[in-house]
Image (cartoon, rainbow, N blue to C red):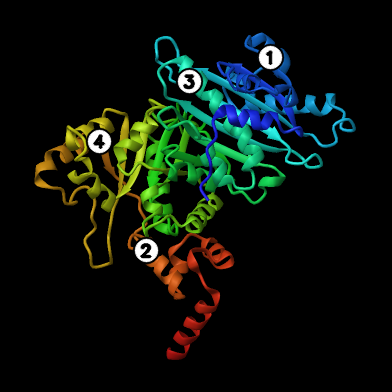
Amino acid sequence: MERVILTAKQKALRLNLDPNIYGTFAEIGAGQEVVRHFFRAGGASGTIAKTMSAYDKDFSDAIYGKEEKNRYVCESRLRKMIVHEYGLVEQRLNRDLHPSKKFFSYANTVATIDFKKKYKGHGWMGIKFQTSPEKSPNEVILHVQLHENEAALQQETIGVLGVNMLYGCYFYYQNPREYLKSLYDNLNRDQVEIDMISMSGPDFESVDNRLLSLQLVKNGMTDAVIFSPDGKNLQSADLLYKKNILAIRGSFRPVTKVNIDMIINGYNAFSKENRVEADDLQVLFEITLNNLSADGDIDEQDFIDRADILCSLGQTVMISNYQEYYKLIEYFSTFTKKRMGLIMGVNNMVELFNEKYYRDLNGGILEAFGILFTRDLKIYLYPSKSDEKETLVNSKNMEVHPRLKPLYEYLIGNGRIVDLENFDPEVLSIQSRTALKMIREGASGWEKMVPNYVDVMIKKNRLFGFDPELFEKVNQTEDKEA
């Protein structure tokens, strides 16, 4: 049955008329619009215990404490707000007098577009809430990018989104995917982009926040998400702001020794660059949505399998909808002007020079390369060799269309494309698709293609369709034939 989409006023009124939902609103910065919907809907006294707006920084500091780096539109500020306000709810409302109340504290910290329209606006929104009086509270936190060109419009958008958040916490908490979709009720991507969400608490114990990240990209709510080695969803600006960025793209299905050799050699080369600070360098393993849907629809278990292995290796993972590299670099450039690096295999480099990917651009491949190389970008080419008899392929003998040869040679001559020299010749011929096929067919030998302990993880957790019974059966047969 299709979900009925209510207006913000209808949602606020339904919440107000529920005698057991009770809590506080705290909005600082430009986000002053959420609680207004509840006041105007009617019956707000049944829902709102307190509302406040510490617009002045000194007042805000006196209540919630000061922020490092003097940043107030940030996750740490939001967390301080909801923890402080929820604590006051529990402290000031006698549970004996309110035995059936489900407490909540909603907060946001928002900066809208500035007068010169140089800074577009963004914000953090969060809720700490109970789904029953005896339960510990859950927590939902999200970050938004505001895309409208008027501050007043952005404020109205925040108001609707805040209502959607609180409503979803009480009516969709049992279905996180539906909750995610409901955030866009009466809104669209042209108005607001949700680029980070995190759910935690007793009602969300089974929720994998990495899957929520995937849903954000899959549903078109944002174009890229990042999560840390411990599986925590990260806000891109917090991670990438003014950093040197080194990225490697792949399917990592599974991650192989050649992937690790690529990142080690790429990192060693990139970190030695003059304009690179090793202590301020962020490495990303990037998987495109196109890579995740290579077999049709996105297989979420397959995605988690890849993520589990990369995270176990201590890597930060990015999921993006940027099939073309120039879009990826354009995205990185919104956070940093420092030197960036891309590590590519020969096949990816050949595709980079394929003009079919740039037909939607008026300037074609030249426009795309203008976006790429007007930034401070270096591409590190990892060589290719299918087997011992094949010739090693690198930048010196890679096939490029004659029409694009001058451009290719120009980039090499200017040091924008460089070969990785210290590669391990023993791993060059390893391919993920071969390892995956062997894993699924129950064959042996793929264990030598993946990094140490990854084979143990795959077998123990039955990743990528590994079947221990099939594996034992196939290898017993092979032993008998031998």
Residue at x 64%, y 25% (from the top left corner): 107
Q: Which residue position holds label 4?
A: 415
How would you rate the neighbour count of disc 1 (Cα within 10 Å): few for under 14, some for 14-19, many for 20 or more?
Answer: some
Horizontally, residue 70 falls left or right of residue 390, namely: right
Mark nearer the viewer, 1 or 3: 3
Residue at x 37%, y 63% (from the top left corner): 433
Q: Which residue position holds label 2?
A: 433
CB atoms of marks 4 and 1 within 8 Å: no
Mark nearer the viewer, 2 or 1: 1
Give SS at disc 3: helix
Q: Which residue position holds label 1?
A: 61
Residue at x 55%, y 66% (from the top left corner): 462
The span from disc 4 to disc 3 (Cα, nearest Å) is 44 Å
The span from disc 2 to disc 1 (Cα, nearest Å) is 55 Å
Give SS at disc 2: helix
Q: Earlier in the sequence, mark 4 or mark 1?
A: 1
x, y percentage for residue 297?
40, 56
Horizontally, residue 295 falls left or right of residue 142, namely: left
Mark nearer the viewer, 2 or 4: 2
Mark nearer the viewer, 4 or 1: 1
Q: Amino acid at mark 3?
A: Gln
Q: Amino acid at mark 2?
A: Arg
Residue at x 35%, y 53% (from the top left corner): 423
Residue 84 appears anywhere in the view: no
Camera-side residue of 137 and 277: 137
